[in-house]
Image (tube, coloured by chain):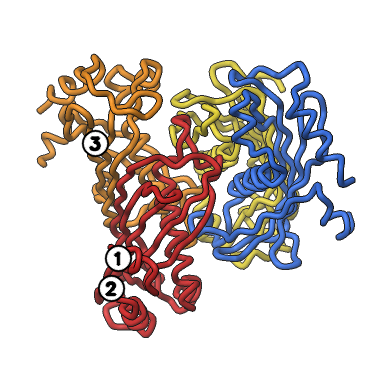
Chain colours: A blue, B orange, C yellow, D red
Amino acid sequence: MSRQEDRSMTNHVTVFRVRYAETDQMGIAHHGTYLTWFEMGRSGLCRDWGKPYARWEAEGIFLPVVEASCRYKSPARYDEELALHTQVEQVKPHSVTFRYRLFCGGRLLAEGRTRHAFTDPEGRLIRQGHPLIQWLRERSAEGL
Amino acid sequence: MSRQEDRSMTNHVTVFRVRYAETDQMGIAHHGTYLTWFEMGRSGLCRDWGKPYARWEAEGIFLPVVEASCRYKSPARYDEELALHTQVEQVKPHSVTFRYRLFCGGRLLAEGRTRHAFTDPEGRLIRQGHPLIQWLRERSAEGL
Amino acid sequence: MSRQEDRSMTNHVTVFRVRYAETDQMGIAHHGTYLTWFEMGRSGLCRDWGKPYARWEAEGIFLPVVEASCRYKSPARYDEELALHTQVEQVKPHSVTFRYRLFCGGRLLAEGRTRHAFTDPEGRLIRQGHPLIQWLRERSAEGL
Amino acid sequence: MSRQEDRSMTNHVTVFRVRYAETDQMGIAHHGTYLTWFEMGRSGLCRDWGKPYARWEAEGIFLPVVEASCRYKSPARYDEELALHTQVEQVKPHSVTFRYRLFCGGRLLAEGRTRHAFTDPEGRLIRQGHPLIQWLRERSAEGL
């Protein structure tokens, strides 16, 4: 993926620093924390696009994670400033996949993906379309 | 408090090991984790006494923390087996205070307290008595 | 994989309860926590097999995660008792892969994998064999 | 303390949003997270003042927490933007106390304190003065 595409409208960048509590005794950020960072990236993207995730839940649509993966290429250290690039990779009728790339300066630290179901508050799949899902499909296609 | 009292019915002991994710780059368990351990102690005590906290919430009573404190005397390290002693220290009409002491072998690592309000699901104080609160008062007085 | 194999010597079972702090406002255990649970499973397996991971680090061998994935099939809830099955799936010259399956009663909640490099304290790959790595290969092959 | 003093040089403000992972099934930010936020405030203050905490550790001075307390007045919710005010309250020969106040808009959500020892990498108290400790005492007195 070219730098040009990185700056497309489908890409959200979150900048933050590694917290001390996020390190472990190996002296690097704990690998489990990355999933929390990815979540922060999704939140930022939805907020930025004008549909904060809190509103999704208020309208009765939840996006539980059904699959997550991450490849760790280089460690992140305490207080380093990181840039997380978040994209909607694919919207299907019953799920959405986000893609993440984490950078420190120009260095790629990690990349990952999460796939989410669209469910109601009780965790049941939403079988029919919903304006928010439709919006997500259209909005994420815009910049391509 | 004497050892005798420690073994009273008002005392619950939870045994667990320090997780790797709970350490930080200082090579010791992160101080924030202790509040999570204390919570595990409260959960164990309520379950042991026959009124799991999940049931409290199911009956519409929540116990949000309104005050917490901890004194850290000696560090806890990865994979060490710890014993957390939890007690109900005081039950008032609108709050309950738990006390915690954390041991590794015979060594006291930390002691702390949390105070909790009794609220409804919306976070409003429960003004009137409730059978569960009454039960907690009586049950915690038994062993004294 | 048959139940028979599950009970082989290459399989370690960790039993634990979901902590309140591990839930999120969806009312289920947060997906990031699963990686911490998997880590607890690895720790238990190494301890059980007589080579606690703390000893690995003391001997200068670290196992940072280079890849992690998880499929979430059914949510875990506060205070539920879970059983985590951990296996060494593959030992290569420079990495080891663990496999995890998480159960609540007979229900499979999630399955995942983590791949770990063998590094020195500075994070450099250990290029040559080491008795602990050799031991891991042999020990994990025993039950197959 | 007046608003005037709040803006003194001894006061650092960190602005951040509540992460989804930081909520629990009560639908509010988990109380243990506040200690992690306070830590983020200390980190920000030290960085802002030109002596990042990473440098302290590089020079062999560690600041483990020996005491922590927090009063929770009003809950914090997912994605809310919070402002954490951090101050050095007192510098003693062997310890430093930080004070924190957490706001959402004009509303005070919580206030807390942490006390830290000055130790070497092995956790032994630093008995003699050190330029960084001297600096902290002088710098924190400036704005008063």
Q: Residue B144 at x, y = what percent?
A: 9, 28
Q: How far apart are the alpha carbons under marks 3 and 1?
A: 25 Å
Residue drawn 49% across and 78% down? D50
- Mark 2 sits on what residue? D91
Q: Position of residue D5 (x, y in %)?
A: 33, 68
Mark 1 chain: D
Image check: A94 left or right of C28?
A: right
Is the C-beta separation of discs 3 and 1 under 8 Å? no
Report the front residue among D142 and B41: D142
For mark 1, give the secondary structure: strand
Q: Secondary structure at mark 3?
A: strand
Task: Establish whether labels 3 and 1 are both on one chain.
Answer: no
Circle 1: residue type: Thr
The mark tally for this picture is: 3
Image point 30% across, 65% down: which residue? D97
Residue corresponding to mark 3 = B98
